Image: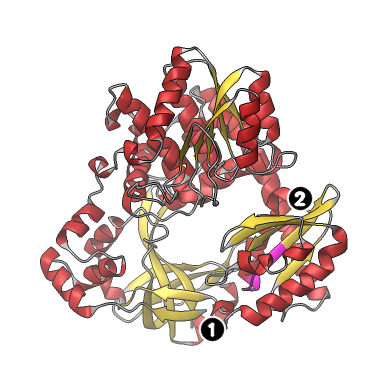
Amino acid sequence: MRWTIQEVDSEKVKQLAIALQVDELIARLLVQRGITTFEEAKTFFRPSLDDLHDPYLMKDMDRAVGRIETAIANQENVLVFGDYDVDGTTAVSLVSSYLRSYYNRVDTYIPDRYTEGYGISRQGIDYAADNDCKLIIALDCGIKSIDLVAYAKTLGVDFIICDHHLPGETIPDAVAVLDPKRQDCNYPYDELCGCGVGFKLIQALGQNRGQTIDDLTSYLDLVAVAIGADIVPIDGENRVLAYYGMEIINKFPRESITALFGEFRKTTYDISDVVFTIAPRINAAGRIESGNYAVDLLTETDPKVALQKAHEIELFNTERKDLDKTITEEALLQIKINKEQENATTVVYKETWHKGVIGIVASRLIETYHRPTLVFTKSGDYLAASARSVPGFDVYKAIEACKEYLIQFGGHVSAAGLTLEPRNYQKFKDKFEAVVAATISESCQEEEVKIDAEIPLSKITPKFIRILKQFAPFGPKNRTPVFLTHNLRDTGYAKQIGSDSSHLSLNVTDGDSTFKAIAFGKGNKLSEVQRGEFSAVYCIDENEWRGDVSVQLRVKDLK
């Protein structure tokens, strides 16, 4: 890894430290996050539901609420439609359960990953028409579904679209299109996830019915799960939503959340627990079987039934993990056999690989070979691929440069999907390699760890940890602080751990203070840390084991 200590305006740090009466290290962390005044710090450390924006500032919100109220007044059937990933299924669960709290003619629909694909589908529209649904509320999708919305109109089906993706040049001709990224939308915050847009819709519906934000906080757990899983920035309005969503998860968890955590028990859950425990299980339903399993669980109120449904999803997740492990091993072997270790890209293919996990496998391969990666599998008569990129490189643009070999493609800077004919696989692979090799910078080819501050271990005091915890919830735009300490030694307890000895357990000291440390994936560094002094880049965690909580350094890299 390339270690980069983040630069900061030292004068702003000093001024903020004086204004807040805090250590300059705390002020430095705040300034790095764009916080330079007392008021900004107060807003950051004390998120308030009063800081949520008026939902009616979002373009078309009045039209959306009006159409839903008309549907209820006319006793129309309403279909709540969403994607099969975490953002989509939580959004469908949120909006459908809110509407069902006072209206019973509400159905849900999650498209099949393999027969329908991502987003609004013709089959979903036909389902609505066949079941006499006059209104579809589409969540986390639809902003580019021009033709499908037009098709629905011919069947007498109206659309309300709630999306957060970038629109194209034309907006679908729907009754209402809620998307803060619309150029003609003046909503103050445009980084909401799909479930977040869904929450703004029920907030507006609630206001129309005389409800306050306090009447809706029980739905924020679903929003927090979606924010964490969809990797949207956790600043501004998202920070407020995530903060109070995590509060609900910890104090008043719904039956499905409790069931999904299973035997993983902690005094206090944080958003990384949601990302690494809840989100993969919800995703596994759509990857292996159907996203409907996730919606059924997330809307379940009977604890016994929730446990049963969570068990089913756990089986899907176990299958997903087994597939992930097997396919990753096969892909790494393929790279080795083909002697492609030194390529600028990773492009692998096997027709039997499960389509539902190739995106995960692409991310796994980047952990070994830090470069743009595509994993292909057979999909009907064609080949389908999931692409993942490294920070700083636009994989979508590189794929677009090879579009003459593609049937279709879509995505964004860091992730994409594509389809091509089998005869064009090698041609595409060769051109993609050439395009990336010619355009990728040297810095993108080396993994970087950004360091907030260099500190001695003595800085890690109980007071410092208490303040650091108030920086949570962490995520994009507010990453977990990363620290650097030099001249460390292991106290003699270093050992390899894990079923394959791939991780490293340490007890580190700089002569003044000593802490336990864990270095995931660094088991091969054992002899180095036993030899003498080393430097470490790490985050500060609280490790909980059987009710006992202790401070632990989570090491990201060692030198």
In terms of depth relative to the viewer, which is nearer, 14 or 26?
14
Q: Which residue is located at x 36 percent, y 58 percent?
A: 550
Residue 497: x percent and y percent?
57, 65
Residue 404 versus residue 78: which sits nearer the camera?
404
Residue at point 61%, 42% (across, down): 145
Is there any visible trace of residue 428 in the rendered image? yes
Name the quadrant containing residue 329.
bottom right
Q: How many marks?
A: 2
- Give residue 20's quadrant in the image: bottom left
Q: Residue at x 77, y 70 (%)?
A: 429
Where residue 470 sits, quadrant-wise, is bottom left
Q: Position of residue 251 (x, y in %)?
A: 34, 36
Q: Is the residue 299 above or below the residue 391 in the image?
A: above
Q: Is residue 447 magenta?
A: no
Q: Which mark is residue 528?
A: 1
Labels 2 and 1: the sequence-earlier one: 2
Colour setup of the view: secondary structure
* Disc 1 element: helix
Residue 372 in the magenta stretch? The answer is yes
Q: Vertical placement of 370 versus 97: above or below?
A: below
Per the model, the C-alpha gap separating discs 2 and 1 is 39 Å
Which label lies toward us, 2 or 1? 2
**Which three-letter amino acid code belongs to the residue tagged 2?**
His
**Residue positioned most to the bottom:** 532
In the image, 143: left or right of 452? right
Percent x, y of residue 519:
50, 69
Residue at the right extreme, as displayed: 423
Q: Which residues are magenta?
A: 368-374
* Label annotation for residue 354: 2
Disc 2 to disc 1: CB gap under 8 Å: no
